[in-house]
Amino acid sequence: MGLGPGRLDCLTGQAVDAINEAEVILGYKTYMNLVAPLVDGKKLVSSSMTRELDRAGQALDLAGQGKTVALISSGDPGIYAMAAVVFELAASRKIELGPGGVSLEVIPGVPAVAAAASLLGAPLSHDFACISLSDRLTPWELIEKRLDLAAQADFVIALYNPKSKGRPWQLGHACEIISNWRNPETPVGVVRRALRAGQAIDLVTLATLAEAEVDMQTMVIVGNSQSFISKGKMITPRGYIGKYGGA
């Protein structure tokens, strides 16, 4: 299930129901802290980052024992999160799903990219691509290729996992790749900790993005050739004014 950006009033009703119905709550300890007010009386199983397979395995084991389990992710569980891990592990273990087996339900949440975009204005109003800069599971050469093709195709580009202490150089290199196809004055939205404590919003350009304050809790949205800034908001036009004119 997805927590969305982490603020309790951003949880969907379906997610709240899942927490209430669950006997066991599993998740990364930082995410568990975000729902602490909702989990009194539940069995809680938390673990550190990079323990995704362990969490998925525990969730499947507990569900196989007849427990109702909520495995939590930030944002949406199907976007760079736990849903695929659970389904892949269930397939590799040949676990029967559905009637007579383990019942799996994916409960959506507000994705990080949508939370960040809402604070910036309307940067995703036309075609966009989401690309993670983490090479922990994806070869950097493939990430480079995706960046190059997305920039060439003039997609708005949303960057997940843009910078960590262990790989501080990749955002700068991504900027270089995108700059091969994009004007240096292209607007870029930088949103840290969207819709939760410590939120910070900055509007920069592609030319200055590499120097912006960015970490793993930051979403970076690079505009396309039509994106612009107006009254402190980032906008990517869909094309209505150009086709039909303004009122």
Image: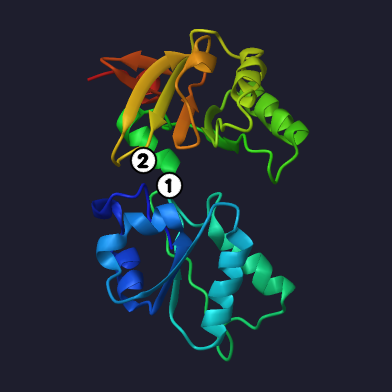
Which percent across, then down, holds residue 213?
45, 22
127 vs 111, left or right, is right
**Crowding at mark 1 (Cα within 10 Å: few <14, some 14-19, many 20+):** many
View extreme (bottom): residue = 100
Amino acid type, label 1: Pro
Which percent across, then down, holds residue 12?
31, 59
Report which residue position mark 2 lands on: 115
Which percent across, then down, holds residue 229?
35, 15
Mark 1: secondary structure: loop
The numbered disc on residue 111 is 1
| Quadrant of the drawing holding the C terminus | top left
Q: Is residue 54 above or below residue 193?
A: below
Q: Tell me, yes or no, whether the two marked residues, 1 and 2, touch with CB atoms within 8 Å.
A: yes
Residue 238 appears in the figure: no
Q: Is residue 32 above or below residue 42?
A: above
Which percent across, then down, holds residue 31?
41, 54
Amino acid type, label 2: Ala
Q: Is residue 221 above or below residue 205?
A: below
Residue 51 appears in the figure: yes
- At 71% from the left edge and 42% from the top edge, which residue is drawn? 138
CA gap between label 1 and label 2 equals 6 Å
182 and 69: which one is in front? Answer: 69
- At 59% from the left edge and 58% from the top edge, which residue is drawn? 51
**Crowding at mark 2 (Cα within 10 Å: few <14, some 14-19, many 20+):** some
Mark 2: secondary structure: helix
| The quarter of the displayed image where residue 3 is located | bottom left
